[in-house]
Image (cartoon, rainbow, N blue to C red):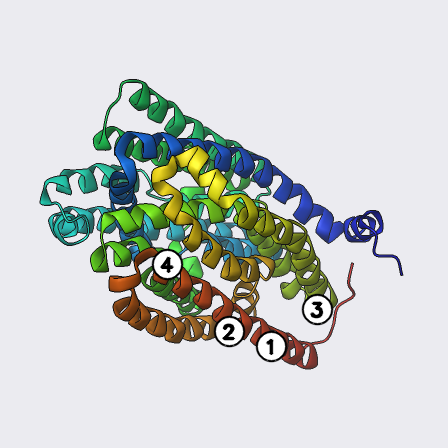
Amino acid sequence: MSWSPGRLWARLYANPLLQRVLRNSGYLLSANTLSTGLSMVQGALAARMVGVEGLGLVGVITDFGSNINRLTSFRMSQLVIHYVGDFTEKGKPREAAAVFKAAGLAEIASSLLAVGLIAIFSPLAARFLGHDPAVAPLFLVYGLAILANLMMESSTGLLQLADRFAALSWIALGQSLVTLGLMAIAFWRQEGLLAVVVAYTAGKACGAVASSVLALVEARRRWGAGWWGAPLRLLWDRRVEMWRFAWSTNLSTTIALITRDSELLWLSAFSNPTQVGLYKVARAITNVLFVPVNPLISTTYREVSLEISARRWPNVRYLLRSGSVLASLWTLPAAVGLALFGRWFISLVYTPAFVEAYFPLLILLVGTVIVNILYWNRSVLLLLGQASYPNWVHLWAGVLKIAGTVALVPTAGANAMAALLSGHFAATTGVLVLHTDRALRQAEALSPVAPGV
């Protein structure tokens, strides 16, 4: 068999399942590529305005607000995709509308709670994370973006289920353009930290509002003007199942934000904003690897969810294998390129003051390559009814990572944090992929296999 790029591409694209994944991923990829480029420019302008320490402080402020929001969130996008899709397939539109309504109401409540927590804890965050009590008002400023985030997750889930990936890509691009425009104005006027935080706040808020409005339009199109009146009691028989699903996704988010997504906060608490600034640059550059792969996560999840519901197990495995092949075609050469030219790129874009971010970048590339190629490592278990297993894996790995943070970060700073995250990626991904394979074999043995596409 020939494994030339042309034949490989033809074989992959011949399957209609992968055609949909590629088409929808293409919409998001186009926007994500442009958005990432714009984000790099935003970061470069911010770095030149506020320096290494100031950029670290911006990261602490934005991460604090975002993580408070994640703490109260139930990742409603996954719940909406799963249950609205399930009820729609079964010809129950009122139940589907009730799911979206329930998800939206729960998310609005969680967003309001998040804003309240930010208001309460911002003085402590400024003192112990920002190392400067005077910056407490900036934490409140960024809280306005969370307030605009009222039902962002639920809206994203409905739009993904409705195959509105092109619209989501335009929203993401528009959000980046708003942020860049405000950042450019601030750079031209030689403003400081407040202007940088305002730019990030306004961009995030615009994206959240646009997604929510478009989702409400989609809900009206699907279920009519009175969709909001669908009674929640229609979900009574499945309330326990839905609650467990939502709680599991919230728990996984909480574990992730404590062990992985709040790294800038841990680093600042046990080190200083300068190390945060260096690590933030290393992470920003490493994120380039995720750009073409991130769209595959949501598009693959949608297709795998439908195939698992129909018990078409060969299609499930085909989607996972094909997704990993596609991810590796980008990830491996891109990682080599960053390893070779990363130091030069950092010096050129962020100024030589940030060149120490190169070594953390090299460390991060190891774990990033692994988790990027096997990007589906958790989502399949969630769909197979084993949502708690990834939570336990991440919990125990997170405990070890936190212990390492306390022991190593005070002396090794950004380098230690990079090594801990890279090891966390590699270990958790390996365990979850092996368990996913076992879970699929068990599902195939217990359930009749429907014909594949």
- Residue 337 percent location from the top left of the image: 59, 46
| Separation (CA) of disc 1 from disc 4 | 36 Å
Q: Which mark is residue 386?
A: 2
Question: In front: mark 2 or mark 4?
Answer: 4
Residue type at numbered disc 4: Asn
Q: Which mark is residue 218?
A: none
**Residue at the (20%, 42%) spot, across then down:** 139
Residue underneath mark 1: 439
| Separation (CA) of disc 3 from disc 2 | 16 Å
Residue underneath mark 4: 415
- Residue 418 percent location from the top left of the image: 40, 59
Callout 1 touching callout 2 (CB < 8 Å): yes
| Separation (CA) of disc 1 from disc 2 | 9 Å
One can see residue 111 in this view: no
Residue underneath mark 3: 313
Under circle 4, the secondary element is helix
Under circle 3, the secondary element is helix
Question: Quadrant location of residue 302?
Answer: bottom right
